[in-house]
Amino acid sequence: MKLPFFEGELIKTSSLVFLASLGANLIVFLANLFFLNQLSAESFGTLKTALYLFAFLPVMIEFGIGMSLTKYIAEFRSKKKIGYLVKWFLKLRVFSYLILIILILLLNEQISLIFFKDPSLIFPGILLIGLSFFNVFQFIALGYQRFKLFAVSQFLTLTMSSFFGVLLIPLGIFYIILGWSLGPLIGNLFAMRFFFDKKLKEYKEFDVKRIFWKFSVPIYFVSIPTALFSVIVPLLSLFFSQILIGYFSFAFIFYSATLLIPGALATVIFPKVSELNGLKRLADAKNLLKKAFSLYSFVAFVGILLVFLFSDWFILFFKNYLPSLFMFKVLVSLGLIFGYNTIYANYLQGIGKIKRYALLTLIQNIFLIVISFALLNSMT
């Protein structure tokens, strides 16, 4: 049976969101290259530790709010029920963010001492956390099925963070993080305007707590394994010097880049697999998975070949990071191999095997942490 890869409104929508995400992540990758060339390995390690840490902490208080808003805004037809739902979850988000910020202020000396030895970075870190609050408006737009608006918001958020971060490089790490924090605010302005234009001023009360405990909390715990990706650099910084973390961060941004291509395939096949699963056509879904694996196998083979043939030459463009050559080869090769796992994990999501998806992602990230620890330990 013919299985077109890019036909149908569902695939077009998914491709649009993917292209926006891919474009933004490529810009982030280029911004990291600027940071590499302008900062020492130690300073780059400090910067990446701070950015990853302040990106991870809000995830810990997400509690599935974004996914809940997307799901139930899409399901509800009553404007008043949607108004009450949004009001309830926004109040919870404001409260949880305030608690997190207060805790960081109280523990600012301990946090700076443990992770990056620079207490001045706490303030821009708090600003980054605070402004990431506005990312919730992307999920509201997605719930209303405004896919273009969602894609634009995602693109602008990462692009603006990269732009202001690069712009402020000459002023140092403090200002780079300060500039990076502006992305979530600027990027979500259109989504915020869309939300306020809805004028959800009238409410119809109902039991939102039931949604929170039955859906939000379970989906929150399922998302934790994915969030572990962001905590790898801060976690390793507990055991190794910032210069070693800088070497690792250099290799890690290229590891992340290798996941963009399998991420492309995964993003495209996910909605199609979901559709086939709903039609009880699991055999066709498996054929689609096999096709994705076949396409990616060529990419993985060529990628690994290029790594071992040209890594020694490529790293000469980043002479400050020559000691990380072996780590670079291992992590980039690992990322290319993990691409299969990325595609398969999204296939599991598509057929509704959420627990297996979470377990597979957890195993991948734990394995990555163990390998990373071993690589850094070999350099001490």
Image: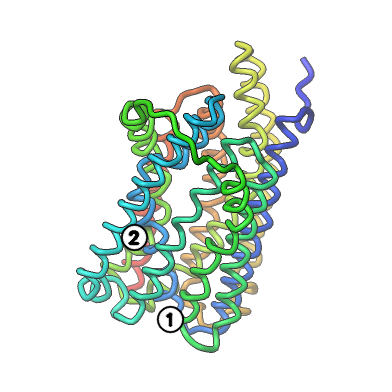
Name the colouring of the figure: rainbow
Few, some or many residues within 10 Å of mark 2 (<14, 14–19, 20+): few
Residue assigned mark 1? 174
Looking at the rendered image, the quarter that the N terminus falls into is top right
Residue 73, position as x, y percentages in the image: 53, 32
User: Horizontal placement of 11 versus 213: left or right?
Assistant: right
Q: Residue at x 36, y 77 (%)?
A: 121
- Dividing the picture into quarters, in which one does residue 114 lie? bottom left
Residue type for callout 2: Ala
Q: Secondary structure at mark 2?
A: helix
As drawn, the residue found furthest toward the top would be 280
Residue type beneath disc 1 = Phe
Q: CA distance from mark 2 to mark 1?
A: 31 Å
Q: Residue at x 52, y 75 (%)?
A: 179
Q: Secondary structure at mark 1?
A: helix
In this rendering, the count of numbered labels is 2
Mark 1, Cα crowd under 10 Å, few <14 / some 14-19 / many 20+, is: some
Q: Which mark is residue 189?
A: none
Is any part of residue 280 visible from this angle?
Answer: yes
Q: Is residue 370 visible?
A: no
Kindly identify which residue carries mark 2: 374
Query: Looking at the image, is mark 2 or mark 1 earlier in the sequence?
Result: 1
Q: Is residue 269 left or right of residue 201?
A: right
Which residue, as the protein is rendered here, is positioned at the far front? 202
The answer to whether residue 311 is above or below residue 364 is below
Q: Are marks 2 and 1 in contact (CB under 8 Å)?
A: no
